[in-house]
Image: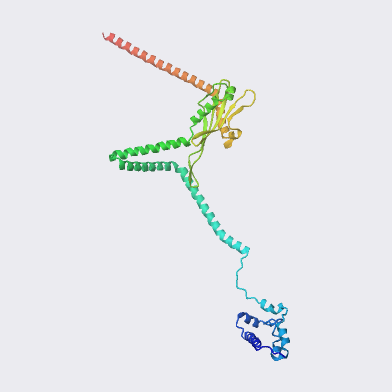
């Protein structure tokens, strides 16, 4: 019978000695854990495929060829033997899990104080803004005057410094001359700004009359030429410098004007709405109310429509009522004027008669005294 080679048996013994040493000295934490908690079903360490035949190989060498063929023959791999090793898991590390609810709660806790701080700051900002607007509305004339004076001083010092650098002037003439020039510049600037942002009712009246006298429809209905009167009513709204949200703004100024006109055939009442826009007169409404003998009054719109007429809660209609009443009471005013004139004439006549009687009385008294003097002279002679 052939014996297995010696070097092969030596390798088998060396491998077996290593396996027994690793089982007797489990130094690794994995081996310690497996040895301390052995599985009741599977052994703590899996057996290799040749462990079951190692004794036969060492102690029964009679059938060495059969044993070698048996050892070297491949066997199907059994996964159950490695379940204990593969199922081993390290203890879980401490970790923090953040859920959506906890994140939302923390976010809301962070957002709530921020929103509260923002609301408080907004309230304080609104309160400060209202206080500044009230102070501006009460004292804007004083502030504008102070600003104009400061601007005069700044211009004066700049012009005086520039002129003294290049030209040799006497100190008194330069100071007062440039002060007058700076004052004139500021005054003209103020006048320009006032003319740009304010509305002149007389100019609005002239613009409206020019448009009426050049409209063929109005001239056909009322008869040419059209003439106005001195009776006018107007209301100004808006305009002027305003402090809003910490910004200086110039509001648009509006003028609501109403006046009667007279043509060769009919009379009418003109309603005008004018707005100052970029220094120009922008007419929003131009309408004429013409009273008709048979039927209601007829309203003709040259510019605008009924919505523009009702703007401002019917402000033009409120202005229209006193003008219409004044026009209706015109005859009554004429009668009263005639009566007052007659009374004045009667009073003047009575006063003249009284003065004439007093004059006649003084003349008579003077003549009487003169006769008495003459009689006394005759008696003495």
335 or 279: which is nearer to us? 279
65 or 305: nearer the viewer? 65
Which quadrant of the view contains residue 355?
top left
Give the camera-side residue of 25 and 9. 9
Task: Name the colouring of the figure.
Answer: rainbow
Q: Is residue 233 above or below residue 157?
A: above
- Does the image show residue 87? no
* Residue furthest left in the image: 381
**Residue 207: x and y, percent?**
51, 29
The residue located at (69%, 78%) in the rendering is 82
Residue at 30 percent of width and 10 percent of height: 374
Relative image position of residue 194 (x, y in whole percent): 45, 36
Q: Residue 147: image x %, image y %?
A: 41, 43
**Total residue callouts:** 0
Q: Position of residue 65 (x, y in %)?
A: 72, 87
Q: Is residue 107 above or below residue 237?
A: below
Can residue 121 be spotted in the picture?
yes
Tell me which corner region of the image, top left, top right, bottom left or bottom right, holds residue 8: bottom right
Report whether 69 appears left or right of 283: right
Which quarter of the figure is the C terminus placed in? top left
Quadrant of the image for the N terminus?
bottom right
Q: Does 53 sit above or below residue 308?
A: below
Q: Is 145 left, or right, of 172 in this rendering?
A: right
Instruction: From the viewer's side, name the closer residue of 160 and 125.
Output: 160
């Amino acid at each position: 019978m052939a014996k297995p080679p010696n070097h092969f048996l030596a390798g088998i013994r060396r491998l077996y000695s290593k396996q027994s040493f690793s089982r007797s000295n489990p130094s690794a934490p994995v081996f310690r854990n497996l040895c301390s908690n052995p599985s009741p079903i599977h052994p703590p360490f899996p057996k290799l495929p040749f462990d079951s035949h190692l004794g036969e190989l060492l102690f029964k060498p009679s059938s060495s060829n059969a044993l070698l063929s048996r050892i070297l023959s491949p066997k199907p791999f059994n996964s159950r033997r490695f379940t204990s090793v593969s199922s081993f898991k390290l203890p879980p590390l401490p970790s923090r899990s953040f859920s959506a609810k906890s994140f939302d709660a923390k976010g809301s806790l962070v957002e709530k104080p921020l929103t509260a701080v923002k609301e408080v700051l907004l309230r304080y900002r609104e309160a400060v803004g209202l206080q500044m607007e009230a102070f501006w509305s009460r004292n804007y004339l004083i502030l504008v005057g102070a600003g104009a004076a400061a601007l005069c001083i700044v211009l004066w010092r700049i012009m005086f410094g520039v002129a003294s650098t290049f030209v040799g002037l006497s100190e008194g003439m330069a100071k007062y001359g440039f002060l007058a020039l700076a004052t004139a510049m500021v005054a003209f600037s103020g006048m320009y700004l006032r003319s740009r942002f304010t509305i002149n009712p007389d100019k609005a009246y002239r613009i409206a009359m020019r448009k009426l006298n050049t409209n063929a429809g109005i001239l056909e209905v009322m008869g040419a030429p059209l003439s106005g009167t001195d009776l006018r009513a107007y209301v100004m709204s808006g305009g002027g410098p305003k402090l809003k949200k910490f910004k200086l703004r110039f509001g648009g100024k509006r003028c609501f004007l109403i006046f009667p006109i007279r043509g060769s055939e009919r009379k009418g009442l003109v309603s005008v709405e004018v707005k100052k826009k970029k220094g120009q007169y922008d007419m929003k409404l131009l309408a004429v109310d013409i009273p008709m003998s048979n039927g209601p009054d007829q309203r003709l719109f040259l510019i605008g429509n009924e919505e523009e007429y009702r703007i401002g809660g019917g402000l033009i209609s409120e202005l229209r009522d006193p003008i219409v009443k004044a026009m209706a009471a015109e005859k009554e005013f004429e009668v009263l004027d005639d009566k007052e004139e007659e009374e004045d004439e009667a009073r003047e006549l009575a006063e003249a008669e009284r003065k004439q009687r007093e004059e006649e009385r003084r003349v008579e008294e003077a003549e009487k005294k003169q006769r008495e003097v003459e009689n006394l002279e005759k008696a003495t002679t």
